[in-house]
């Protein structure tokens, strides 16, 4: 990282939720913060760049703009994303593709655009917002879970590729967070007559989210990770979700998947 205490930070999905909380915290800590999202960041002091992470050219232009103004990019937080819910059988291809276009390929666009600058300067930190669902696949959120599992794999591989160049990469894996994410979810009730557990499962998810952690908790975790010289590549947040990830890692797959099924796929 640079010797200058004021780092240059770019956060995607900064117009609300975790992204906005992170933008406010990093700015309050003295960093120069740019927020990239489709809507302007409402927080005073945050430099807004309106762009869609699925537009590769727009993302590259945004990062070039930041680097041309500031001379470097110290921290990239890839936070833009959304969720879809519904039975795999009845999820439209267009919805599934959009899930991956935003969550996975949108993040990939940002990472690929930032890496040339970070390798050139010999330093940088990339933080990706993943999910506990990337470790334990949630019924009726299969495509969301798959997109987050793909992000975890992307982070692990990229971290090894760029470590020799002084660039660090890590994923934060939240559980249930109380944000506008719940209202923004694309929900499909198609097949609810065939899958009796669908409506109950989605209602359980939404209740858990509305009773979930504040996005400020995740923002503080992101800030802590951004300051570490050798961060864990995958980090869950909160004792409950750390325990879930440990169970997923050490229990036989059949058993851990059965437990998740009892929680989210019971009639």
Image (cartoon, helix red, strand yellow):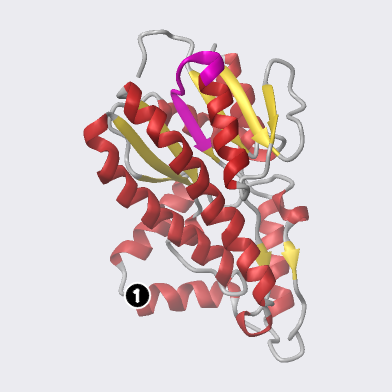
Q: Who's the residue at 62% across and 36% down the image? A: 19
Up the image or down, 154 lies above or below 17; here it is below
Residue 57 lies, in percent from the top left, at 59, 42
Rendered location of residue 130, percent (x, y):
49, 50
Q: Quadrant of the N terminus?
A: top left
**Relative to 186, 250 lies left or right:** left
- Callout 1: few (<14), some (14-19), or many (20+) C-alpha neighbours within 10 Å? few
At numbered mark 1, what does the secondary structure look like: helix, strand or loop? helix
Residue assigned mark 1: 253
Query: Which residue extends farthest top?
Result: 4
- The residue that appears at 68% across and 50% down in the rendered structure is 211
Q: Is 79 on the left-hand or right-hand side of 237?
A: right
Residue 265 percent across, percent down from the top left: 59, 79
66 or 25, which lies in front?
A: 66
- The extreme bottom residue here reads 194
Magenta residues, start to end? 68-77
């Amino acid at each position: 990282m640079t010797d200058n205490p004021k780092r240059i930070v770019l956060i995607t999905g900064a117009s609300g939720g975790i992204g906005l909380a992170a933008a406010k915290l990093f700015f309050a800590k003295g960093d120069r913060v740019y927020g990239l999202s489709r809507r302007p960041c409402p927080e005073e002091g945050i430099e807004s760049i309106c762009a869609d992470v699925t537009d590769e050219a727009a993302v590259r232009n945004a990062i070039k703009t930041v680097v041309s103004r500031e001379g470097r990019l110290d921290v990239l937080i890839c936070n833009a994303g959304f969720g879809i819910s519904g039975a795999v059988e009845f999820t439209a291809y267009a919805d599934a593709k959009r899930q991956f276009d935003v969550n996975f390929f949108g993040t990939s666009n940002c990472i690929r655009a930032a890496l040339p600058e970070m390798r050139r300067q010999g330093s940088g930190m990339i933080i990706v917002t993943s999910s506990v669902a990337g470790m334990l696949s949630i019924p009726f959120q299969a495509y969301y879970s798959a997109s987050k599992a793909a992000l975890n794999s992307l982070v692990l591989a990229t971290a090894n590729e760029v470590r020799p160049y002084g660039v660090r990469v890590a994923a934060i894996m939240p559980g249930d967070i109380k944000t506008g994410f719940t209202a923004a979810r694309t929900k499909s009730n198609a097949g609810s007559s065939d899958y009796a557990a669908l409506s109950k499962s989605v209602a359980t998810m939404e209740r858990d989210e509305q009773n979930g952690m504040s996005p400020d908790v995740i923002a503080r975790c992101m800030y802590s990770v951004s300051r570490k010289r050798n961060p864990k590549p995958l980090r869950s947040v909160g004792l409950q979700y750390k325990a879930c990830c440990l169970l997923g890692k050490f229990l036989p797959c059949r058993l851990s998947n059965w437990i998740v099924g009892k929680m989210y796929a019971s009639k």
